[in-house]
Image (spheres, grey):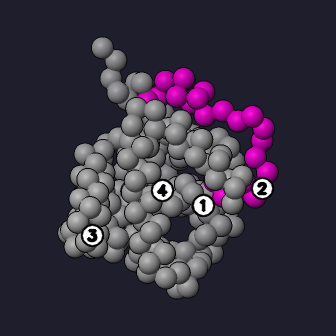
Amino acid sequence: MPSTIKSDTSKPAWDELTLASQPDPTQLDNIKAQLDLVLLALEALANVSSEAILQAAANLNLTNVVADRVSLWRLRQSSPLRRGQGRKRLDVEEARALVLIICHLAKQHQELIRRAVTLLEQLTEQNREPHQAALLGDYLDGFSNTYQERMDDGENISPDQLTHLALKLLIDLLFYSAPNGSRRLWLALLDRSVRE
């Protein structure tokens, strides 16, 4: 029986992330921004570190794209939302690699993601604020603090907007942790890159 890592690194997973046409620079900027935000949500919820991202890259045989902390930092800094961004342009192959890495990490933390989404549903049904649950409060605080620290508009975005963004990304992570998560994330990125 093949291991889950083998199926994650198989050629079909990479081949599913296809493009009808090459994205223009604006679309690539939107894709970069979205990928960075999803990684930020994973960091805030599951304390995903640079080392965990590099380990995922190694497990998925993607070290040619994300070889070390410097290459990872450059990829993350390519987001147009970042302070001091613009040092590197993200190409389609790097975007594909980040999609596979994100979904691999989301699968690893699927139980935590499910627990957080279930808590959110329960609190919403009870008309209670998400911060009232420790897990969600910690996630929202971590996401907001990191966003404000790293992003260009961090000081100008309202706490309500940050909470809304963080909760939307949390729900998205649940879908990306599913077996076909990489395809879902890829399609969402392409769709959002055209709309934004």
**What span is colored magenta in the figure?**
8-31
The reply to whether the C-beta atoms of the residues labelled 3 and 1 are less than 8 Å apart is no
Q: Is residue 109 visible?
A: yes
Mark 2 is surrounded, within 10 Å at the Cα level, by few (under 14), some (14 to 19) or many (20 or more) other residues, namely few
Q: CA distance from mark 3 to mark 2?
A: 42 Å
Residue 165 at x, y = what percent? 47, 66
Residue 159 at x, y = what percent? 43, 81
Q: Which mark is residue 25?
A: 2
Residue receiving disc 4: 38
Give the SS element for disc 4.
helix
Residue receiving disc 1: 33
The reply to whether the C-beta atoms of the residues labelled 4 and 2 are less than 8 Å apart is no
Give the SS element for disc 3.
loop
Q: Earlier in the sequence, mark 2 or mark 1?
A: 2
Mark 3 is surrounded, within 10 Å at the Cα level, by few (under 14), some (14 to 19) or many (20 or more) other residues, namely few
Residue 41: which quarter of the image?
bottom left
Judged from this view, the residue extending furthest toward the top is 1
Q: Amino acid at mark 3?
A: Asn
Q: Earlier in the sequence, mark 3 or mark 2?
A: 2
Residue receiving disc 3: 127
Q: What residue is drawn where x is 28% and y is 48%?
A: 114
Q: Earlier in the sequence, mark 4 or mark 2?
A: 2
